[in-house]
Image (cartoon, grey):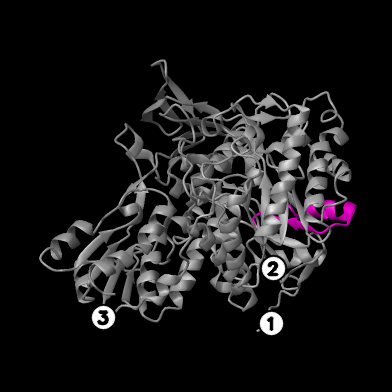
Amino acid sequence: MKSKYHHIFEPMTIRRMTVKNRIVMTPMGTNYGEQNGEMSFLHINYYEQRAKGGTGLLIVENASVDSPQGSNGTTQLRIDLDNYIPRLFKLCENVHKHGACIAIQLNHAGASAMSSRIGMQPVSASNIPSKANGEIPRPLEKEEILQIVKKYGEAAKRAQICGFDAVEIHAGHSYLLSQFLSPLTNKRTDEFGGSPENRARFTKLVIEEVRKQVGPFFPIFVRISADEMMEGGNTLEDTLEYLQYFEKEVDVFDVSCGLNGSIQYQIDANYFPDGWRSYMSKAVKEKYNKPCITVGNIRNPQVAEDILARGNADFIGMGRGLIADPEWVNKVEFGNECDLRKCISCNIGCAGHRIGLNQPIRCTINPAVNSGEDYMKRKITKPCNVVVIGGGTAGLEAACTAAEVGCTVFLIEKKPELGGLASVISKIPDKNRLADFPKYLIHRASKLHNLFIFKNTDATVDLVKSLNPDIIVNATGSVPTLPPITGLHDLVDKDDTQVATVLKMIERLNEYPEDMNGKKVAIIGGGAVGLDVMEYFAPKGADVTMVEMLPMIGNGLDPVTKNDTACKMQKYNVRQMTNTALLEVKNDRFLVKNPEGVEEDVPFDYGFICLGMRANTPVLADLEEAFESTNVEIINIGDSKRARRIIEGTEEGRNILNVLERHDFF
């Protein structure tokens, strides 16, 4: 079947590399490498899956050209010595057999390195940290700069020997070359600082050295932060000026944006629309007539097609989208677009794991980032009935997984619609991308003829018994936490009061005025839900106060969301009352105790109780009692086990495979 997306599937040749389509997997750290900087076989498998899924060009995550000094991340790849060649060769070999091209990103972290990991003071253009409260780096001497230039060239030559089809030089995102290019971090007074030409000199020398090493037929890509999105940083106009100093040997510009201090633009926050950054690649392409990659929350194939058709870019860069669905390209090419598992840009399993916690990456909506859909090849060897109670994301994942391996599955949902809390929260305008996951699960469920869904149905013991279960999955979700505070239960979520949980707020979305100027909003709870409420009201002009018992607002959030919400709170002058306890709820004010132990009123026109969620298990105890003397196993997953995030529920839903194995159904 020929795809309707002609531009996406048009091959393109860069020097002697022909890419079969216009989808590029952009480089993203994974923490899958070995401790010594070598590629692991797990890592090779990860990239091979995306090649198998149809991706035209994969750009491998940043590899250090100068370790330990230039290293970032706990298990970053290295390409600074010849002993890394064999494993990288194996990677290229595995990717090429699926018809994909492969490049590797060359990088030096500069001030983004950490002394605790590299055992020395980080280096940079000047003595300015690459992020707020970061370590103070040591400015590089001219001789050291020239030595690093040489190391980039040597690394590029190694990449060529390994079998890579191209290299990408990272000159953005607050790494070393970016630290020289940006006036925020480059305060030098020698030939590497001051004017745009001087700030671009280091990058120019690197590109020239790489070209010298790889010869005239090998493509060189350069990744840039086209707009640094920070006050005093390079704007798009500034970037268009400095590119003239090193564009000559560049074959493709990978046009990104943002620095460490504006990471929500670099690793897009979920409310940015598909393809929002394509105006940047368009500007670079128009000025320099060079092929460009654009990135930025591109999940919808039609958006990708339109960007290419308009000539705004030549390649569509997808990072997190290919973590979420390695088969994105094949599904689009062969008419299975409705099966796409679209990334919801939550930044929890990818950026949150790697940047925030130094863990290997995972994905909220793809519980098998490494192993893919191989589990579907397994089929049960004897009949098995699975009853799933609750049609939220955890319950749907469990139901679909069990049905896909041959179980007869009965899904019981109390409400008229499936999707659970994710579907509800997605009704907040800035959270609508979240709806893509329940939509995907519901579509996946609809194709399974051995999965029977009962909506508007209470899961009674008698009903469950009548279905002759071998395994029961309880996935009944969570409800808002409402502690026994004076006035709270009398006022919250009542029709004639202004005190609401987030669920009631969503019900009332059409009732709130668009212009909230002069209106006071008070939010009890500074976690993810409280911040969702803040993000809805603050931009409308409301005077927002957030009350949190902990010393900080946004505790436990991924770095992207944390930075984004901190910027918004600053922009909209949100009052933050930390170390503050709620004592009493009234219809127009909250009585709180501040850190000094003083009681004070927080008045409001609209008050919200956002103290998190708690597990809701209305039938679990009855089921456990009813099936106590049988061999039926009852498992409790997702929020009904403990209120957490979607990622844990998805993982636990997929883990029904382990339960089936334990009971010898495989």
Q: For the residue marked with disc 2, what is the amino acid?
A: Gln
In reply to whether residue 292 is colored magenta, the answer given is yes
Q: Look at 55% across and 33% down and name the residue there.
A: 118
Dot 3 crowding, Cα within 10 Å, few <14, some 14–19, many 20+: few
Q: Between marks 3 and 1, how big is the CA–CA gap?
A: 40 Å
Question: Quick check: can you spot residue 598?
Answer: yes
Question: Is disc 1 placed on a helix, strand or loop?
Answer: loop
Dot 1 crowding, Cα within 10 Å, few <14, some 14–19, many 20+: few
Q: Look at 60% across and 26% down and name the residue there.
A: 121
Asked if the residue under mark 2 is in contact with the one under mark 3, i.e. CB atoms within 8 Å, the reply is no
Q: Is residue 120 left or right of residue 591?
A: right
Most foreground residue, 345 or 156: 156
Q: For the residue marked with disc 3, what is the amino acid?
A: Pro
Horizontal and vertical percent for residue 153? 74, 47
Q: Which badge, 2 or 1, comes first in the chain's sequence?
A: 1
Q: Which residue is mark 3?
A: 383
Horizontal and vertical percent for residue 557? 49, 40
Kindly identify which numbered label has been placed on residue 2. Answer: 1
Residue 316, picture quadrant: bottom right
Q: Look at 68% across and 55% down and name the residue there.
A: 159
Q: Is residue 300 left or right of residue 191?
A: left
Most foreground residue, 655 or 419: 655
Q: How many marks?
A: 3
Q: Is residue 46 above or below residue 639?
A: below
- The magenta span reads 277-297
In reply to whether residue 306 is colored magenta, the answer given is no
Most distant residue in the left direction? 629
Horizontal and vertical percent for residue 272? 65, 51
Q: Which residue is mark 2?
A: 302
